[in-house]
Amino acid sequence: MVPALTLALRFRIHNAMATSLGMMLFTSVGGIVGYVLSGTRAINLPPFTIGYILWPAWVVLAVASIAMAQLGAAVAPRIPGKYLNYAFVALLFYISLDMLGAIDRLMRYFS
C-alpha cells in the first residue's frame, strides 16, 4: 500500500505509512473473523483456539504490534522522509529476495 500511496497518490512517506497502518486494522479484523468462522467446525485443534486463531499467540502479537506501532509513531517523524524511503526500499528488497528463496541460498552458501 505504501508504494501505491507515495508513487501514485503523491503522499509523503510519513502519511503513507500511517494511512497504510490504519488500513491494516480493517484487513486484520476481516482476517480474524474469517479464520474464526472457517475454523469453527475443525477438529483436533490445539487448546485455546477459537476457529483457527490461537488466542495466546494472537495476544502476544497484538501487544507487541501495539508497542512497536507506538515506537514507530514516535520515531518516524524525527527521521527525514528521504531516509525512510531508503529504509523502506531496502526492506521491500530483502522481503522480495526472501520470498524468492535467495536469502536461504545465501545463508547456506556462507555457512
Image (cartoon, rainbow, N blue to C red):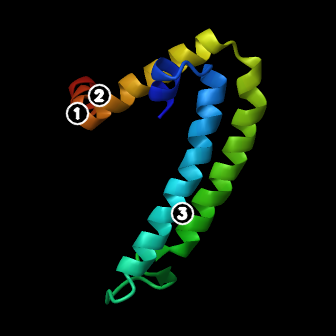
Q: CA distance from mark 2 to mark 1?
A: 5 Å
Given the image, on which type of amino acid does mark 2 rest?
Answer: Leu
Q: Which residue is mark 1?
A: 100
Residue 75 rendering spot, x and y as whole percentages: 74, 27
Q: Which residue is mark 3?
A: 29
Q: Residue at x 55, y 18 (%)?
A: 10
Q: CA distance from mark 3 to mark 2?
A: 29 Å
Say above or below: 34 vs 97: below
SS assignment at label 1:
helix
Q: Which mark is residue 5?
A: none
Given the image, on which type of amino acid does mark 1 rest?
Answer: Leu
The C terminus, quarter of image? top left
Q: Residue at x 60, y 32 (%)?
A: 17
From the viewer's perspective, is the residue at label 3 or at label 1 nearer? 3
Foreground pick, 22 / 76: 22
Given the image, on which type of amino acid does mark 3 rest?
Answer: Val
